[in-house]
Amino acid sequence: MKRLDELLGKQESLAWRGDLRVPIHGVTYDSRQVVPGSCYVAIKGFQRDGADFVADAVSRGAAAVVSVHPPAPGFANVTWVQVKNDRRALSAIASRFHDDPSRRLQVIGVTGTNGKTTTVALIQALLGGAGAVAAAGTLGMNFAGTDWPVKLTTPEAPELFAFMAAALRAGCTSLAMEVSSASLSLHRVDDVAFSQAVFTSFSGDHLDFHGTMESYFEAKLSLFRRLGSDHWAIINGDDAMGPRIIRELNCRYVTFGFAEQADIRPLKHAFGPEGTRGVLQTPRGKIEFQSRLLGRFNLMNIMAAASAALVRGAGADAIAAALAAFQPVKGRASIAHAGDFLVVVDYAHTDDALENLLKAFREIARGRLILVFGAGGSRDKTKRPRMARVACRHADQVVVTSDNPRQEDPLAIIADITAGFDPGFTSYRTEPDRRAAIRLALGMAGPGDVVLIAGKGHEDYQIFRDRTVHFDDFEVVRETLGQGHA
């Protein structure tokens, strides 16, 4: 239990009413989660204002309200604090409520358009596994024996700091976490004390939120500007934006990539349907490795994670052993069927990720590349024609289908995609029913071919305008090809 004035700290307060020394027993931004004694931070959102739910929060026992609005009449029985920035306040209050847990963890933040999820999982494995290292990201928050579901790639501050506190109690010493551009822009991680930051890649995405590519990049860059002289940055030296980040750094850094000047780079490598093997050159000597991870983009993820582990003092033998034992992340270039032809399910939902996926399996496939993909509705529309151009230039056959249409007409999304195909490209079919589209692609496949099912990866649902239904790409493959083969 903490007092409200302790939680507010130096947070800029514009006005208040009531007792600032009121005891606080919980912190939330969701009135439905208020318990007696909670501090309710009324976030002014994009669609609704949390101030509209103050009455609900008070009825459930809120002891304090924090808002950008001045104290409202009719709530004299609770303390009300007006702040300049509600999202900054939420982060600060949540962190202090849990005794600033990130300051007692070595927190490694991984940001970039693609590669975050696999890189976080690899870092967790390379630094000692879930017993020592917690992980947070798209697939959930976890440490040994514990798995917390999430709705966001980077959870809101109350959930995030509560998880950190639980990880500390369980004996974890580190946390590897995905840091989304939205979480940086919306101040969710303002009070996270990062010791390392990893930059995986940058390409077009989330412009529905950020508006411009520059704004999107600035959000990513803000993570690295926070690092001090005792910290480390891990930078993809092959990415065009890598040098720009390096120019902004006030900390130590290492680069990884295929370029000869990268600090961590492959001296040799080989890709196959069984995985990847090679030798990494590092400032601490060579690391000979083999991994079940597939393709060139996963070698980049391996190098990113190995870089993060090396600066933490991990040895070459330990890194090689962890890579050999690492199980691929579900939905990230995951094999759904291996037989005469290969079926791979992947989360690629941007043009850059799709291109990386196709190029990687071009190096592996003995036959054709058959691609199934769509694009999410109510999201960045600018990437749809770009994804189409990538698809028609790198795949041999394409089936355009639905992803999560959300509030849009699936046929309209498909039309946006097909409009981006190169003139004269005819090797494609459209099928809005994703199940039927996957079955269509599998029916095309012959010996040596690779069927790539992109866009949804680990997701086991599909979101439509009026409903969310169970849908799993892996299950459809098993149903179509038979349990014994997928």
Image (tube, helix red, strand yellow):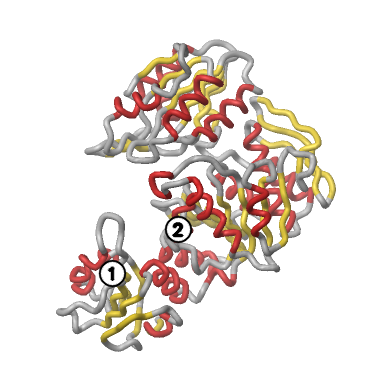
Q: Residue 185, which numbered label?
A: 2
Please tell me whether mark 1 or mark 2 is closer to you in this view. 2
| Callout 2: SS | helix
Question: At which x and y percent is residue 203?
Answer: 54, 40
Question: At which x and y percent is residue 283?
Answer: 82, 51
Image point 24% across, 68% down: which residue? 51
Which residue does the numbered mark 1 point to in the structure image?
34
Determine contact: label 1, label 2, CB under 8 Å.
no
With respect to residue 374, does 9 lie above or below?
A: below
Res 127 visible: no
With respect to residue 330, does 9 lie above or below?
A: below
Q: Quadrant of residue 447?
A: top right
Inspect the image, locate mark 1, and give the three-letter code of the amino acid beneath it. Val
Image point 27% across, 30% down: which residue? 409
| Callout 1: SS | loop
Question: At which x and y percent is residue 82?
Answer: 31, 77
Quarter of the picture containing the N terminus is bottom left
Precedes in sequence: disc 1 or disc 2: 1
Image point 34% across, 80% down: which residue? 14
With respect to residue 258, does 307 lie above or below?
A: below
Q: Nearer the viewer, residue 434 or 190?
A: 190
Inspect the image, locate mark 2, and give the three-letter code of the amino acid beneath it. Ser
Q: Quadrant of residue 66?
A: bottom left
With respect to residue 429, does 236 lie above or below?
A: below
How crowded pointer 2 is (Cα within 10 Å; few <14, some 14-19, many 20+) is rated as: some
